Image: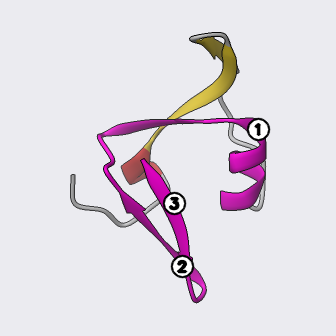
Amino acid sequence: MLFARDGDGFVVSGCQETARVTEKTARFLFAAPLDTAPEAHTGVVKKEFRVADHFACRP
């Protein structure tokens, strides 16, 4: 998955219905912390969220 800024918005490529982000990526994308518990995925702590809850998207 690739996140890129586009002016005041973001472009996300290669996305599914849910996404997992590290704390660093979450701070880059969101003004407030995600309201989900962090979990280890392949040894890396990430938070999972439903993409449509935060972005206008077409899966």
Give 42 or 8, whichever is nearer the viewer: 42
Which residue lies under the disc numbered 1? 23
Residue 2 spot, x, y in % from top left: 46, 55
Q: Amino acid at mark 2?
A: Gly
Between the C-alphas of marks 1 and 3, the distance is 14 Å
Q: Amino acid at mark 1?
A: Glu
Residue 16 in the magenta stretch? The answer is yes
From the viewer's perspective, is 34 left or right of 5? right
| Above or below for 44 versus 6 | above
Q: Residue at x 37, y 52 (%)?
A: 52
Which residue lies under the disc numbered 3? 3
Q: Residue at x 69, y 35 (%)?
A: 22
Disc 2 packing (10 Å; few <14; some 14–19; many ≥20): few
Q: Secondary structure at mark 1?
A: helix
Question: Which of marks 2 and 1 precedes in the sequence?
Answer: 2
Residue 30 visible in rendering: no
Q: Amino acid at mark 3?
A: Phe
Between the C-alphas of marks 3 and 2, the distance is 10 Å
Question: Which of marks 3 and 1 precedes in the sequence?
Answer: 3
Q: Residue at x 44, y 62 (%)?
A: 55
Disc 3 packing (10 Å; few <14; some 14–19; many ≥20): some
Which residue lies under the disc numbered 2? 9
- Residue interval drawn in magenta: 1-29
Residue 17 spot, x, y in % from top left: 30, 40
| Above or below for 47 versus 26 | above
Residue 12 in the magenta stretch? The answer is yes
Q: Residue at x 51, y 60 (%)?
A: 3
**Residue 18, picture quadrant:** top left
Q: Secondary structure at mark 3?
A: strand
